[in-house]
């Protein structure tokens, strides 16, 4: 058992029974967000091929770019019934200006994995990205399944400039860089009206609204959306004239991520 395991288990005992809740609520890397204008990000977990084929062009047509969270162990395989993009698709997308962020290599649930194993897995994923020509480490990370615990936040919070969960809401005021909030874009649970209301709130609070989804295809899964729905939301954002950035771009702009990728690397893969 590592020092982090012992320390965080102690903390978990102290917050008896509320570990998950506390992990979500306690800002481990608080940052006072002060944006001149609201900003929106479109992010994709697991990197289904359909997101690369359907969502990336929709963003590009509107002059936008997205953030795709890569799990090396899933590449070319299936996850949740979805075909996951192969590494050459990932490299191509990066070359078109999209950000490639990190998920875990084996898409493991970080809450149920010993810290040492989880860190090994995260490192393996980064090494795979490095072999593909990426500037490493990636700027941002998304927790698989959105699950976090005190231990995992402690272990990962300084490895990436920003870490995204699936706790809904807008990032505004004092935000947690170790657990950024995000809003799902799923056909089954959101619609343009509810998304429009969220955008209103982001404008009012000059906040950072991060969307996430998985597959983007006709007859999407319950954790994905149709190309038509995705384009509707992109168009809604475009017509409102709201700035759209990758997660890495915003993290750089607010001064919490290095401004430039290391030289000699394929810059696109750094987002
Ligand atoms: Zn995932």
Image (cartoon, helix red, strand yellow):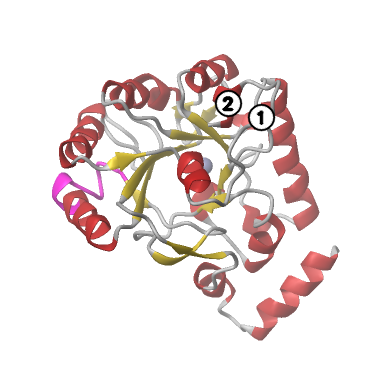
Give yes or no for contact between labels 2 and 1 (Cβ–Cβ under 8 Å): yes
x, y (%) of residue 54?
33, 22
Which residue reaches farthest front? 36
82 or 192, which lies in front?
192
Q: Residues within 10 Å of mark 2 (few under 14, many from 20)?
A: many
Q: Secondary structure at mark 2?
A: helix
Front residue (pair 236, 264): 264
Residue drawn where x is 39% and y is 53% of the image: 182
Find the distance from the CA under tag 2 to the CA under tag 1.
6 Å
- Which residue has dot 2 on it? 269
Task: For the N terminus, give its image quadrant.
Answer: bottom right
- Neighbour tally class for label 1: few under 14, some 14-19, many 20 plus, Cα within 10 Å: many
Residue depicted at x 69% and y 82%: 13
Residue drawn at point x = 31 percent, y = 44 percent: 185
Task: Give the x, y percent position of residue 42.
Answer: 37, 39
Q: Is mark 2 within 8 Å of ligand 1?
A: no
In the image, which disc is placed on residue 135? 1
The magenta segment is 185-194
Q: Is the magenta region chiefly helix, strand or loop?
A: loop
Q: Position of residue 144 (x, y in %)?
A: 55, 47
């Amino acid at each position: 058992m590592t020092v982090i395991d012992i320390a965080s288990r102690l903390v978990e005992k102290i917050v008896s029974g509320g570990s998950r809740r506390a992990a979500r609520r306690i800002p481990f890397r608080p940052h006072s967000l002060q944006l001149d204008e609201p900003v929106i990000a479109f992010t994709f977990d697991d990197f289904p091929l359909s997101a690369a084929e359907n969502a990336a062009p929709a963003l590009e047509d509107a002059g936008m770019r997205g953030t795709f969270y890569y799990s090396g162990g899933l590449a070319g395989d299936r996850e949740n019934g979805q075909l996951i993009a192969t590494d050459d698709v990932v490299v191509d997308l990066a070359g078109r200006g999209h950000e490639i962020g990190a998920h875990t290599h084996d898409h493991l649930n970080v809450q149920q994995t010993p810290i040492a194993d989880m860190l090994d897995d995260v490192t393996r994923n980064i090494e795979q990205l490095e072999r593909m020509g990426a500037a490493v480490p990636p700027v941002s990370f998304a927790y698989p399944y959105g699950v976090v615990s005190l231990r995992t936040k402690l272990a990962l919070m300084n490895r990436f400039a920003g870490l995204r969960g699936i706790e809904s809401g807008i990032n505004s005021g004092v935000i947690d860089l170790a657990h950024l909030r995000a809003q799902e874009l799923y056909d089954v649970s959101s619609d343009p009206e509810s998304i429009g209301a969220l955008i209103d709130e982001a404008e009012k609070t000059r906040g950072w609204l991060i969307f996430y989804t998985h597959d983007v295809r006709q007859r999407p899964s319950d954790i994905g959306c149709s190309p038509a729905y995705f384009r509707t939301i992109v168009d809604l954002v475009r017509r409102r004239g709201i700035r759209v950035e990758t997660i890495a771009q915003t993290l750089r702009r607010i001064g919490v991520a290095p401004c430039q990728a290391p030289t000699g690397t394929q810059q696109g893969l750094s987002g």
